[in-house]
Image (tube, coloured by chain):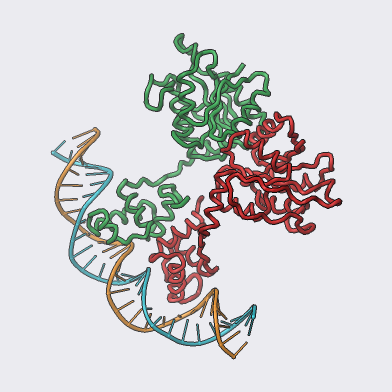
Chain colours: A red, B green, C orange, D cyan
DNA sequence: CGCGGGGTCCACCGATCGGTGGATGCGAAG
DNA sequence: CTTCGCATCCACCGATCGGTGGACCCCGCG
């Protein structure tokens, strides 16, 4: 019997998934939470009788979000991020096969048997590399996209409950490609970012200099550094490229 | 007995919603579709015995999308957008009250009794003004956000099946505010947009002129017109402002 | 101590940009 | 026919931009 905690900020979607899971004889939903915080609070208060084996975690939620909640759960820190005992879960090995099912986790110690650290099955709407990579780093045991068939969700829940790590083939392929060719994301200094942000607002170099109480040539120097790092040769392209890299936000979005 | 067609591109979410709806004694799900096209195909082929009263339509889907599918359904055009008989549904009245429930649709003619045009209940993840306004224009009868409680979904399905128009309070408030203060969105000509797009890619005026085989002064003239319309005084701000207005996309997003 | 990173600053110069004030032609609508 | 919107084009000019090749200072780390 696999016991599941479902974490999703959309009540209708959550109710739907709960209903779906409970049609499966081997699965019972022991709780629901609408946020990462609520999930941690549930775990902090849960008794062994309703302790989950799997936390089905939506990645995109307001508050601390799915990644941070995953990190806390994987460390057994249920009172909130950044507190509690050190993590007892091993780091993930390198992936090489599509839909790999990895060996079970090591046997828990006697003190963990009543409330063993649950596996986190991360559930995403989109195949977002950054968030999924972050979830890996945070210690998640399973990764599934919402576009997967319902049967795959059932199988994934049961596999994670059994202590295994599962990975949707599409996500596996992306991670493998990512590890082969890591994206070199440019690192701008705080000052460079600040100046580029003012450029995006339409300020000229003299205007930026006046606002920051520095010399215009200093502004130009910073911008030239920005151009080098972003591999561009004009301010406009620097701004759009910084947006592509997520360094600048599209204002109003 | 309200019969529902559920349209959502995510199988797990769709299965969950189907399960949720069928827990309600007065609701039966007569079909599922993963896209607007599939929904139209279902309706084109459906017999009166499994004809839906309500189409629960996700707004964000690949292909023709929820808005376009809503338009076709509201016109009774099930073979695809832009074909079939003229619409028999009246346009929506102006909204003034939160969660209004409007009078039932006019009585269908004898020829429509077997397969009356179903009400479309639009179901959105976010409260997206543009898409919801488009759905109103397209003839939808109901609007609900996924953040709403499950009970509200059940109530909305039954109201739409009864021929009423329902509107989540949050969406009603936004639409009322929108009608009071319509956003003046600048209208760029196709050429202006094209040139601004090249500016966003980092091309200089001479480079744009060469690419479009026009004079550089022509490029400048277009850009000056763009600056006037967007109320900016430099190309960089024109680009970011155009992104804020949704005229340009953030490349890579 | 030296080194690297970050921030500040300069002069010079050619290229580009943005503003001004025009001009023409074409097609569609009234 | 006129008017409007769109696209095309020009010369002139001052301001700004981007590149070059420097300079200096401070701080943290080994």
Q: Where does residue B75 sit, x and y in percent of width and height?
A: 43, 23
Q: Can you see residue B89? A: yes
Is residue A101 depicted above or below D10 in this figure? above
Is residue B23 depicted above or below A99 in this figure? above
Left or right of A55? Residue A112 is right
Foreground: B145 or B182?
Answer: B145
Q: Going by the picture, which residue comes out furthest to the right? A: A110
Q: Where does residue A41 sit, x and y in percent of width and height?
A: 77, 47
Q: Classify the position of the N terminus of chain A by image quarter.
A: top right
Is residue B87 depicted above or below A46 in this figure? above
Q: Where does residue A155 sit, x and y in percent of width and height?
A: 66, 37
Foreground: A24 or C26?
Answer: A24
Taking the spot 62% from the left edge, 36% from the top edge, the residue there is A152
Left or right of A47? Residue B155 is left
Task: Choose top left, top right, bottom left or bottom right for residue D15.
Answer: bottom left
Left or right of B162? Residue D2 is left
Q: Can you see residue B106? A: no
Q: Where does residue B197 sit, x and y in percent of width and height?
A: 36, 53
Taking the spot 55% from the left edge, 68% from the top edge, the residue there is A190
Foreground: A3 or B55?
Answer: A3
Q: Going by the picture, which residue comes out furthest to the top? A: B110
Taking the spot 80% from the left edge, 50% from the top edge, the residue there is A108
């Amino acid at each position: 019997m696999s016991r599941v905690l479902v974490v999703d900020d959309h009540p209708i979607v959550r109710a739907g998934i709960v209903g779906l899971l409970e049609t499966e004889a081997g699965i019972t939903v022991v709780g629901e939470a609408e946020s990462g915080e609520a999930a941690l609070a549930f775990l902090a208060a849960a008794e062994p009788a309703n302790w989950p084996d799997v936390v089905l975690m939506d990645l995109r939620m307001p508050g601390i979000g799915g990644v941070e909640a995953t990190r806390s759960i994987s460390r057994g820190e249920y009172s909130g991020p950044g507190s509690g005992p050190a993590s007892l879960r091993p780091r993930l090995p390198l992936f090489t096969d599509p839909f790999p099912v990895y060996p079970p986790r090591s046997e828990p110690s006697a003190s963990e048997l009543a409330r063993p650290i649950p596996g986190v099955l991360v559930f995403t709407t989109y195949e977002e590399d950054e968030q999924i990579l972050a979830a890996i780093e945070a210690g998640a045991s399973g990764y599934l996209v919402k576009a997967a068939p319902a049967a795959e969700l059932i199988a994934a829940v049961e596999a994670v409950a059994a202590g295994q790590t599962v990975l949707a083939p599409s996500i596996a392929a992306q991670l493998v490609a990512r590890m082969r060719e890591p994206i070199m994301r440019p690192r701008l200094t705080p000052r460079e970012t600040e100046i580029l942000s003012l450029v995006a607002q339409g300020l000229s170099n003299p205007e930026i200099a006046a606002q920051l109480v520095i010399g215009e040539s200093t502004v130009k120097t910073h911008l030239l550094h920005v151009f080098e790092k972003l591999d561009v040769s004009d301010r406009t392209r620097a701004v759009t490229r910084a947006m592509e890299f997520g360094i600048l936000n599209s204002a109003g979005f």
